[in-house]
Amino acid sequence: MFKRIDRLAIELPVPAHPDPNGASAVQELLGGKFGEMSTLNNYLFQSFNFRNKSKLRPFYDLVASITAEEFGHVELVANTINLMLTGTTSYSDPDAAPLEPAKHLRMSLHFIDGAQSSLPVDSMGRPWNGTYVVSSGNLIFDLLHNYYLEIGARTHKMRVYEKTDHPTARAMIGYLLVRGGVHILAYAKAISIITGVDVTKIIPVPRLDNKVFDAARVWEERGEHRRLYTFSDNDYQQIARIWRGTHPLDGGKLEAFSGVPGYGGPVPDLEEVPECFAPGLSPEDLEEIARRLSQEAGM
């Protein structure tokens, strides 16, 4: 069972200008092979299918906790795309072709399917694919896959960071580079405990420190690269049996926390896009809906 909190993982800067082509690149971080939908669903199904939970509880708790965090990462990337698309077009009479400014943009789906919002597709518009999920039932295989998956996700984030200087995209990617680095290290430590092979010596992959990125450095300075959260008030406490010791890159102490991080940001309240007929309600409709809600509430 999952508990939802009405806030984003971080506060996203509201941009002064759109970047629709940049938004199409960010789609890779959502619905691509190494996107957040892939990390979420890999860990989600591995946690559902985990065998011998009682005997291997620390490893189950690790996968389950990271699963919960990934839900928030999917939400964060989707809202980044939404903000990057905001303001691309403006309303006018349909015969004036108000969507014409989007005619030559890289991803028509954002304007035809999605009413200028995120979609479960990659940067080329290909739908996210369930065959990206690996849930083999073999713990070492799955942990190795997760380690590889997080490194692939890190690589793609770095490349997309270099494709757009849009402030909303940079803020999101910087944060996820740090949190993804936590997941890479967590899986490396889990593999090392099981096999005796110190996989942590391989990182970082690519050989580039997060501190190189301005938007990531601020989170490392806060120590977020050394913190792993349960995303549960009382459960999954045994992550601390894996997430302990020191960080291999800076020597700082690793810390496991119950619950969620003590920061976050508002979920953007997207304005209507009448040229896309979204949400498709007139001012009169809204007044009538408000009247009905008040009437039903006895107000």
Image: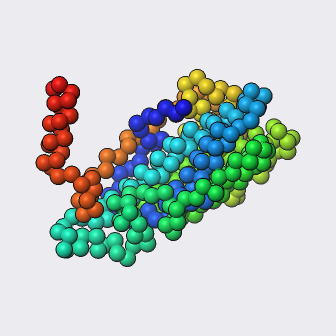
Viewed as shown, does residue 243 lie left or right of 262? right
Q: Which residue: 41% across, 38% down?
A: 7
Vertical position of residue 263 compared to residue 42: above or below? above
Vertical position of residue 99 compared to residue 179: above or below? below
Q: Which residue: 76% across, 32% down?
A: 52
Q: Where is residue 272 in the image (x, y as percent from the top left)?
A: 26, 54
Q: Which colour scheme is used?
A: rainbow
Vertical position of residue 270 compared to residue 22: above or below? above
Viewed as shown, does residue 41 lie left or right of 120? right
Residue found farthest to the bottom:
104
Q: In which quarter of the image is residue 85?
A: bottom left
Q: Where is residue 274 in the image (x, y as percent from the top left)?
A: 23, 59
Residue found farthest to the right:
196
Q: Where is residue 155 in the image (x, y as percent from the top left)?
A: 63, 59
Q: Where is residue 53 in the image (x, y as percent from the top left)?
A: 73, 31
**Residue 253 in sight here:** no
**Residue 91 in sight here:** yes
The mark tally for this picture is 0
The quadrant of the image that shows the N terminus is top right
Viewed as shown, does residue 31 lie left or right of 107? right
Residue found farthest to the top:
234
Q: Which residue: 34% across, 75% down?
A: 103
| Nearest to the observer: residue 293 or residue 104 | 293
The quadrant of the image that shows the C terminus is top left
| Nearest to the observer: residue 81 or residue 32 | 32
Q: Which residue: 38% across, 43% down?
A: 267
